[in-house]
Amino acid sequence: MSRIVETIAPHGGHLVNRVATAAERDEFMARASHLPRVRLDERALSDLIMIAIGGYSPLNGFMNQEDYERVVEEMRLKNGLPWSLPITLSVSEEVAENLKEGSWVRLDDEKGRFVGVLELTQKYRYNKAHEAINVYRTDDEKHPGVQVLYQQGEVNLAGPIWLLQREPHPMFPQYQIDPAQSRRMFVERGWKTVVGFQTRNPIHRAHEYIIKCAMEIVDGLFLHPLVGATKSDDIPADVRMRCYEIMIEKYFPKNRVILAINPCAMRYAGPREAIFHALIRKNYGCTHFIVGRDHAGVGDYYGTYDAQKIFDEFAPEEIGIIPLKFEHAFWCTVTQQMATSKTSPATPEQRIHLSGTKVREMLRRGELPPPEFSRPEVAAELARAMHQ
C-alpha cells in the first residue's frame, strides 16, 4: 500500500525542533545556577515556544541584526525568504551589559521558572520608531502593538534557543497540537488540502459563513484560534474556546474539523500579521488560509482589504500557502441568509452588520446578540461569561 505523504513543506523546507531532549535538559539544569538570567514576558515566552515547536520555521532562535533589519525594511529574511514580522528578544541596556556574546543565557518565565536557553550570538540596538512605522504603519502609542514595542528594552539579544520541556497547556491541554502532530493528523485523515482559520474573537455567523465557503473546496478545516497575549478588552481565551466547541458540536461536520490552539501572541499588525499568520499555518501543514477583510487589524490603522492586498507583493510560490480572500460578510435581509456583496442583491440598508465592539456593548447591557449575528448557544455562552 502506498504511503500518503504531506502535501506542503514547512516554510524554508524543514520543520524546526528546538525542544530539548531529556539528556539535554538535564545538562542545562545542572548549569542553571551559573548562567546569567533573562526573564521573559508573556509574548517572549510564546515566541520561545513557537520557535521551539517549529511554528516559526525556519527560525531556530531570536533574530540577529541582519535578519531583523531586512524583515523590518523588506519583509524578508537575509536569505531572501519571505517573513513579515520581527521575532526579537529585547532587554534593557543594564541587563545587556552583563551578557557576553558567545555565552549561554538562562531564560525564565514570569514566575522565575527555568524554561529555556539562549545561545547568545549577538547584541544589537535598534530603532523603535523605525520598526513601528514599517511594521505597524504608525508610531501612535495608542496602537497596542506599538505600545508593546515602545515598552521593550533598547537592546535585542540574538541566537538559537532551546525549550527545556514542552508542558501541557494550563487551560487547553487537549487542544495543544504542535506542527509535527497536526501534520501527522492531516496525513492520517487523508487530507491533502487543509484550510486554516485564525481569529482572536468569538466565532460568529460571518466567520461561520466564510469558513464553510472555504470548506467546500478543501478536505479539512484546521480551526486554530489564538490563545496567546491579546488586548485587555478582547474576549478571554477560555470563553472563545467554549464557543468553538459549541459550534463544532452543533453546526459543523465533526469529522472534517480539527480544533487546536495557537499559542502565539497578537501583534495587531494588520497586513504584515496576515502574512505572518499564513506562514505559521503553512508550518502546521495547511495548504490554504482564510484572510478576512481586516485581518489582525485594530482601530482605523489599516485600509479595507489591505491584509489581502499585501499577498500580491509576493510570488505565490514564495509564500507557498494559498490565501482565500473573503469580503465582509453580513446578514442579508433580502435572501434571509449570510452573504457578501458578491452574492447578495441587498442595498447597504438591507444588510445587518454587527461588529465585535457592538456585541460586547450589548452583552454588557444584558442584551443577547441577534441570531443574524450569532448562533443562540454562542450568544448565551458569551452573555453568561460577561456576567460571571
Image (cartoon, helix red, strand yellow):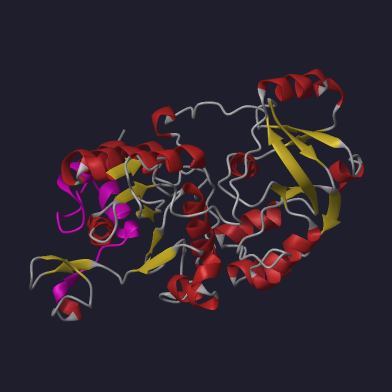
Answer yes or no: is residue 82 visible. Answer: yes
Tell me residue 381's x, y (percent): 24, 39
Residue 84 occupies quadrant: bottom right
The quadrant of the picture occupied by the N terminus is: top left
- 180 or 92, nearer to the observer: 180
State which quadrant residue 12 falls in. bottom right
Q: Is residue 261 visible?
A: no
Q: Which quarter of the rendered picture does the C terminus lie within?
A: top left
* Residue found 75% across the figure and 43% down from its top: 160
Residue furthest front as drawn: 1
Q: Is residue 173 above or below residue 64?
A: above
The picture places residue 245, in percent across and down from the top left corner, at 27, 38
Residue at the image position 66 percent from the left and 32 percent from the top = 109
Residue visible at 45% across and 36% down in the picture: 177
Q: Residue 366 location in percent, x, y?
A: 23, 45
Task: Give whichever of 130, 367 is nearer the camera.
Answer: 130
Identify which residue is drawn at 50% across, 63% down.
320
Residue 363 horizontal side relative to residue 37, left or right: left
Above-or-below relation of 272 to 282: below
Question: In the rendered structure, does residue 124 fall within the stretch colored magenta?
Answer: no
Span colored in magenta: 350-378
- The answer to whether residue 221 is left or right of residue 271 is left
Classify residue 332 as left or right of residue 378: left
Residue 318 in which image quadrant? bottom right
Residue 354 part of the magenta segment: yes
Task: Name above or below for residue 343 compared with residue 31.
Answer: below
